Image (spheres, rainbow, N blue to C red):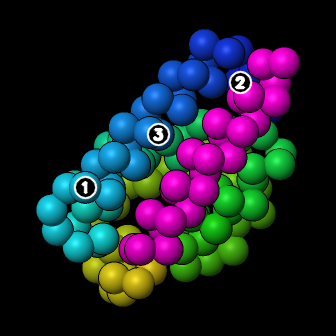
Amino acid sequence: MFINSRTNQTSYISKLSDLMYELLVHPGDAKERLLNNETKIKYILSFPVPESIKPIKRRILENLFNEKVSDPNDLIEINDFKFLFNNKRKATAAKIIKDLNSLLSSMKEYKDQTDV
């Protein structure tokens, strides 16, 4: 179950927003920017998301691991982040960044709906 506290949602969105800023404006190609933000990405992916947002998180994880993910809210340990990107194409890295941005947009929308 996703953390329903507004404070926790706000914190999660803030951290995801900071990550997106770094992924979009920092130098380097998509793979380099993802690798440089390993800690933040691991943090973002460690939190469960609401049911309606699971497909986005599932896409991110499947692009990272190159395999199907049954429940994206299951605890997934990412030990060797650099290894995951050894054989990734830059286009796949760009898809992951796009999906992280979709995750941010969806989380903001979810929070706005639950704040009412």
- Per the image, the residue denoted by label 2 is 3
- Location of residue 12 in the rendering, given as x and y in whole percent from the top left corner: 53, 29
Q: Amino acid at mark 2?
A: Ile
Q: Amino acid at mark 1?
A: Val
- Return the disc, 3 or 2, that comes first in the chain's sequence: 2
Mark 1 or mark 3: whose residue is earlier in sequence: 3
Left/right of residue 79 with respect to residue 98 in the rendered view: left
* Dot 3: element: helix
Neighbours of disc 2 within 10 Å: few (<14), some (14-19), many (20+): few
Answer with left or right where residue 64 lies relative to residue 109: left
Q: Residue at x 75, y 50 (%)?
A: 53
Q: In the image, which disc is placed on residue 25?
A: 1
Residue 8 bears which disc, if any?
Answer: none
Q: Check disc 3 and report the residue beneath it.
A: 16
The answer to whether residue 26 is above or below residue 2 is below
Q: Secondary structure at mark 1?
A: helix
The location of residue 17, given as percent across then percent down, is 44, 39
The range drawn in magenta is: 93-116
Q: Residue at x 32, y 57 (%)?
A: 24
Q: Secondary structure at mark 2?
A: loop
Residue at mark 3 to residue at mark 2: CA–CA distance: 15 Å
- Magenta stretch encompasses residue 106: yes
Say which of 46 and 97 sits in front: 97
Q: Is residue 23 above or below residue 7?
A: below
